[in-house]
Amino acid sequence: DIVMTQSPLSLPVTPGEPASISCRSSQSLLHSNGYNYLAWYLQKPGKSPQLLIYLGSNRASGVPVRFTGSGSGTDFTLKISRVEADDVGVYYCMHTLQTPFTFGGGTKVEIK
Amino acid sequence: QVHLVQSGAEVKKSGASVKVSCKASGHTFSNYAIHWVRQAPGQRLEWVGWINAGNGKTKYSQRFQGRATMTRDTSASTVYMELTSLTSEDSAVYYCAKVQPDFEAFDIWGQGTMVTVSS
């Protein structure tokens, strides 16, 4: 199974400041079609996860432009250019290159 | 807009089985790939398996092979996940989620079903 490792575990941020979350996979997520099979989700308190980024760097519909996904192969990053209060929750990366799909352990973003 | 609506919370005894449903709205149910993911307290999200709503083909995580069964009722636009031989470690919120094929990601999630297993 592919192991997904996220850091940091917790990320206190000041509104208006940037934030960055790292996700590493135990093997490359680059498919032969040129896409990285890596997605990012945000789970707000008491809610289901919601899709933010798919195929490594594509924003899902309705996701603000302050969210950016980047990286390739085994190293990926989710950046929030200017954190807002509504961005609090737990962020997860997940691969879909092969079954079983696996998730990172999550990064809890909270406002200072 | 597609919605996935799951059945309500369940409380079961150890050794029992639970069956959770996930009803999909939308006109193209048979085109859906529905996955199940669970979230135990303090644990990371865990993929259980998936079902092709069109042909009923399934694939399960090795961890759940033999204990999880996914089925579908196309006339009701509903998929089901049954988990047998429950233990306290199966206490979790179970989510169904739909794959958007062009995204290779879960674009729609159900609201979750809490399953509590007591001894």
Image (tube, rainbow, N blue to C red):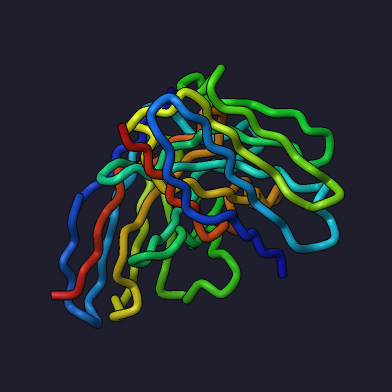
Image vertical order of residue B93 relative to residue B46, above or below: below
As drawn, the residue found furthest toward the left would be A112
Res A6 quadrant in image:
top left
Image vertical order of residue B90 relative to residue A51, above or below: above
The quadrant in which the N terminus of chain B is found is bottom right
Query: A68 or B61, which is in the foreground?
Result: B61
> Which x, y percent locates residue B15?
43, 24
Q: Residue at 22% of width from left, 81% of height from top?
A: A15
Q: Residue at 49% of width from left, 50% of height from top?
A: A39
Q: Residue at 47% of width from left, 76% of height from top?
A: A64
Query: B56 or A17, which is in the foreground?
Result: B56
Relative to B38, B109 lies left or right: right
> Which x, y percent locates residue B75?
86, 49
Q: Residue at 28% of width from left, 80% of height from top?
A: A85
Query: B100 or A49, which is in the foreground?
Result: A49
Image vertical order of residue A63 relative to residue B81, above or below: below
> Which x, y percent locates residue B58?
69, 28
Question: Tag count in the figure?
Answer: 0
